[in-house]
């Protein structure tokens, strides 16, 4: 367990409401100095609210938090001079963050390195690019049925990916695509992405609507 003087951020029982909505529900954090730390959660589940509290832009309803030894309420000015913490790109978080907290419904449900979290999911991820983008919907249906998992449509209109619990089934899934008349120009079997990790841990994607509306600090 890191000592207080080793921590950049220490939070205990951090809570924030917006009306009847509890956007942050008792978050505990212990982030070591000198590293990069990531929050993985869908937009709308409290990530922005948590960051705004850590940066003193919002006051928590309850809980205690220090940033580099300074209390975010009593020493807000000192905290603001020392923070700059963020990116919303999962690929950057995957590459840069030493540790990542997975947050769902305002609570931390898993925490560890990117490799730790991916190991919890197991298996791998099959990424496929179809020749005809109009057939991506068909490919999504075929792969989901073959691998018993939801497929994720990627930014490339011809690409999609899906978690593979049993890597031996990936070849059968590709054969099913060919049998359905879907031509594939490229495929790759590798580790799951952070979005796929989140999907496996929570049942929904880390991509979604914007965060809860936030208020200016009082």
Image (cartoon, grey):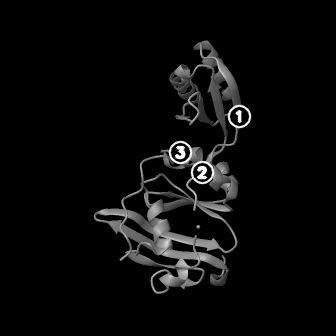
Task: Tell me the element at label 2.
Answer: helix
Could you tell me residue 198's position as x and y percent? 55, 49
Residue drawn at 59 percent across, 13 percent down: 181
Could you tell me residue 176's position as x and y percent? 61, 18
Task: Tell me the element at label 3.
Answer: helix
Query: Which one is nearer the viewer's eye here, 150 or 91?
Result: 91
Query: Which one is nearer the viewer's eye here, 9 or 3?
Result: 9
- Name above or below for residue 111 compared with residue 29: above
The residue labelled by disc 1 is 189
Q: Residues within 10 Å of mark 1 (few under 14, many from 20)?
A: some
Comes first in the chain, label 1 or label 3: 1
Could you tell me residue 207's position as x and y percent? 49, 46
Task: Tell me the element at label 1.
Answer: strand
Residue 199's disc is 3
Mark whose residue sits in front, 1 or 2: 2
What whole-number distance in Å separates the C-alpha atoms at marks 2 and 3? 13 Å
Residue 157's disc is none
Residue 90's disc is 2
Mark whose residue sits in front, 2 or 3: 2
Query: Looking at the image, do the residues carrying marks 1 and 3 touch, with CB atoms under 8 Å apart?
Result: no
């Amino acid at each position: 367990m890191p000592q207080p003087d080793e921590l950049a951020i220490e939070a205990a029982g951090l809570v924030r409401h917006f009306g009847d909505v509890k956007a942050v529900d008792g978050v505990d954090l212990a982030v070591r100095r000198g590293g990069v730390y990531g929050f993985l959660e869908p937009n709308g589940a409290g990530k922005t609210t948590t960051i705004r509290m850590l940066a003193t832009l919002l006051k928590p309803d309850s809980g205690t938090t220090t940033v580099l030894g300074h209390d975010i309420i009593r020493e807000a000015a000192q905290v603001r001079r020392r923070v700059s913490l963020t990116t919303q790109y999962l690929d950057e978080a995957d590459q840069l963050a030493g540790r990542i907290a997975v947050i769902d419904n305002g609570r931390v449900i898993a925490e560890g390195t990117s490799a730790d979290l991916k190991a919890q999911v197991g298996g791998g991820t099959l990424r496929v690019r179809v020749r005809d983008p109009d057939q991506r919907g068909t490919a999504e249906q075929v792969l989901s049925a073959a691998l018993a998992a939801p497929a994720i449509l990627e930014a490339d209109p011809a690409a999609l990916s899906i978690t593979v619990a049993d890597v031996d089934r990936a070849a059968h899934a590709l054969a099913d695509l060919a049998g359905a008349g879907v031509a594939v120009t490229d495929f790759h079997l590798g580790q799951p992405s952070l979005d796929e990790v989140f999907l496996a841990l929570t049942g929904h994607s880390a991509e979604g609507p914007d965060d809860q509306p936030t208020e200016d600090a009082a």
